[in-house]
Image (cartoon, rainbow, N blue to C red):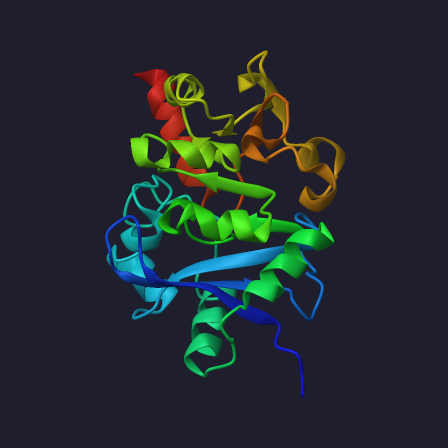
């Protein structure tokens, strides 16, 4: 029997708004070919009832993205192409291709030491924290850091922020931050540029974006993706104001 490349690690209500969602971990049978992330197990958090690209276009992605400013119906600079990997996972899930993960499988993944990314698409705070603990998650980001309920997630996740004011508030709440920037000159003394952008090192090798699991500076990353121009324009307007 062919080993599935994905397993369902969570199926239940979104902790953001209660809508049914699914989290699928992929890369179980085939090593990731993503040059930026390297050999990390990826996790796609999707609505169970609406295809990702449709949910994103209609604003129904709030169930798995919460208040993220990068959403298409917000400021529209998200780099994730929802019709590709997230939609493929959605279709495979509904074809019954992904079995529910067993406790033994999760223990094996955690003990193996392989890097796990929480929320390759979707916000990890939509999923119970115990799920991420069970996987031994290494990399993850959340836009829901202002919600006091999410504070314990700081152990594993970076607070995803766009402004210095947000960075200050997130740091005060105990989060290390991952801040999107338009220029390298925007980096602060307590920030380091994403090493994939500065040295070409992949996420699996780097491991800096691991919340409080590591002692390191906050991280800044140059905005990327097809919609990055929307963020750059927003930053210019902010500076001009």
* Camera-side residue of 102 and 63: 102
Against 190, is 59 above or below? below
Please give the name of the residue rendered at 67% of the width and 88% of the height, measured from the top-left corner: 1
Against 171, is 200 above or below? below
Residue 153, percent from left and from top = 44, 37
For residue 74, side relative to residue 112 (left or right): left
Residue 118 visible in the current orientation: no
Residue 66, percent from left and from top = 31, 45
Q: Quadrant of residue 174?
A: top left
For residue 180, side relative to residue 208 (left or right): left
Please give the name of the residue rendered at 64% of the width and 64% of the height, measured from the top-left corner: 27
For residue 240, side relative to residue 97 (left or right): left
Residue 30, percent from left and from top = 70, 69
Please give the name of the residue rendered at 40% of the width and 24% of the height, measured from the top-left corner: 236
Q: Residue furthest top?
A: 189
For residue 184, side relative to residue 92 (left or right): right
């Amino acid at each position: 029997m062919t080993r599935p490349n994905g397993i369902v690690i969570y199926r239940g209500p979104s902790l953001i708004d209660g809508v049914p969602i699914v989290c699928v971990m992929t890369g179980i049978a085939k090593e990731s070919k993503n040059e930026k992330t390297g050999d990390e197990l990826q996790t796609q958090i999707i609505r169970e009832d609406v295809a990702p690209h449709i949910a994103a276009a209609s604003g129904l992605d709030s169930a798995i993205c919460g208040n993220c400013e990068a959403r298409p119906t917000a400021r529209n600079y998200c780099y994730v192409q929802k019709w590709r990997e997230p939609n493929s996972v959605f279709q495979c899930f509904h074809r019954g291709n992904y079995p529910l993960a067993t406790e033994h499988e999760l223990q094996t993944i955690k003990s193996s030491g392989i890097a796990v990314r929480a929320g390759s698409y979707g916000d990890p705070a939509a999923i119970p924290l115990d799920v991420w603990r069970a996987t031994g998650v290494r990399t993850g980001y959340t836009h829901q850091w202002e919600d006091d309920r999410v504070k314990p997630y700081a152990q594993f996740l970076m607070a995803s922020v766009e402004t210095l004011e947000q960075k200050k508030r997130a740091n005060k709440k105990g989060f290390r931050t991952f801040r999107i920037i338009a220029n390298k000159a925007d980096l602060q003394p307590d920030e380091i540029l994403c090493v994939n952008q500065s040295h070409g090192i992949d996420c699996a090798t780097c491991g800096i974006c691991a919340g409080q699991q590591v002692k390191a500076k906050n991280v800044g990353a140059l905005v990327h993706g097809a919609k990055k121009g929307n963020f750059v324009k927003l930053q210019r307007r902010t500076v001009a104001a």
